[in-house]
Image: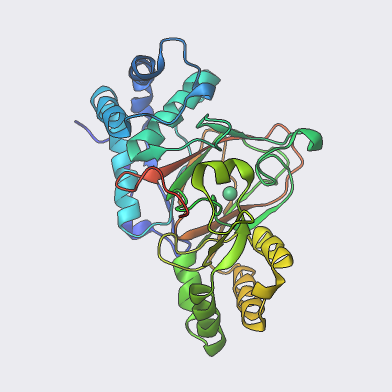
Amino acid sequence: MESAVSSSVAEIPASGMAELHIESRWTIESDAVDQVLAEEYGADVAGADLTPPKDPAGLRAKLRAGAPQLAAVTDEMRRLFNAGACGVMIPSLGLVHLSQDRRRKSVFALSALLGNPTETEPDNHRVVWDVTPAPQEERQFSKFSQAPDEAVYHTDSTIVPIPERFFLLYAMTQASCGGGLSTLRDGRHVIEVLEQSEEGRRAVKTLRETPLPIRIPKAFRRKYGSTASDGYSYVPVFAEKPMWRWRKDKIEQGLVKHPESETPEVRFALDTVAAQLADTSNEMRQPLPTDGIVIIDNHVAFHGRTAFTDTNRHLLRIRFHDIDESYEQSWV
Ligand SMILES: [Fe+2]
């Protein structure tokens, strides 16, 4: 079969974000994707209601058979991650002519080919999450995904035992105000820079060796447990899987609740990493255009977003574990 994708490993820039251009011939496979999902979830299932597949490998096999060109796209993404990318962006996925429901299903299928999609949170089993501003009183779960404010550098799912390795963002509607730019820093590069100085090495050592308290919300505690009786778990900011577990606001909240954990060394280490993240010299900062998609390696990359005012901005987000990673974990 003729390849529908083009990219070059040599083109992975210093930011770690590779760009992939594809021909959208695979979108003719949208019918096949729909059919596979109808077999799995029932004929009437809406893209917004899709839940994590019970048999991710089985679904993957069916999608590979039914949508080989989409599988070729995800194979190329995989190759780029294997070659060292910490993010892959496709500026135009080719879905604009499809209904919103079809777009949700196509993006879901893409995630299911790359890994094992997870639910957004334990009380809401839906996989596809709408990232769009909600009125203050209706915001739930996440401060970042339902607000138009800046999202400073962070990693996702820091409150689960093993955060998903990947997440994707697909732009239904790009912000027209010039804001809402996506930002990315390669966490491996951040470490490299830190390890060049005595202070940086000290900070990394502290964050590797000192588990810090993070509050596990009730719904997540019911599912994953926690390592302490007050609903907190103690985890290192810097480890192997993930390399970084960084939600600075939640780390700070944990230290307020457990001031005994805020030693001068911990404070120094957190401030040192924050200062390094403020250096934008190797970051990617660009809009995700309408119909564009980005997949981020959440185990190594930091990501963020600039503030925006256009309330029509609308992205879809799906998180997924890597294929060979355990689907469910617990803290204890
Ligand atoms: Fe995020």
Q: Is residue 327 left or right of residue 225?
A: left
State the scheme by which the image is colored: rainbow
Is residue 98 shown to the viewer in this render? Answer: no
How far from the left and from the top, in percent, is residue 181? 63, 49
* Nearer the observer, 138 or 289: 138
Hey, which residue is sitting farthest left in the picture?
A: 1
How far from the left and from the top, in percent, is residue 199? 57, 86
In the figure, 193 relative to 55: above or below? below
Hey, which residue is sitting farthest top in the picture?
A: 43
Q: Residue 253, located in which quarter of the rendered image?
A: bottom right
How far from the left and from the top, in percent, is residue 100? 54, 21
Is residue 253 shown to the viewer in this render? Answer: yes
How far from the left and from the top, in percent, is residue 108? 44, 30
| The N terminus sits in image quarter | top left
In the figure, 249 relative to 225: above or below? below
| The C terminus sits in image quarter | bottom left
Q: Is residue 217 left or right of residue 94?
A: right
Give me the residue at 66% from left, 43% from top.
142
* Nearer the observer, 261 or 6: 261
Q: Is residue 212 left or right of residue 83?
A: right
* Nearer the observer, 200 or 281: 200
Hey, which residue is sitting farthest front in the picture?
A: 229
Give me the residue at 57% from left, 31% from top.
124
In the figure, 155 relative to 265: above or below? above
Q: Residue 145, located in which quarter of the rendered image?
A: top right
The number of callouts visible is 0
Q: Is residue 305 left or right of residue 299?
A: right
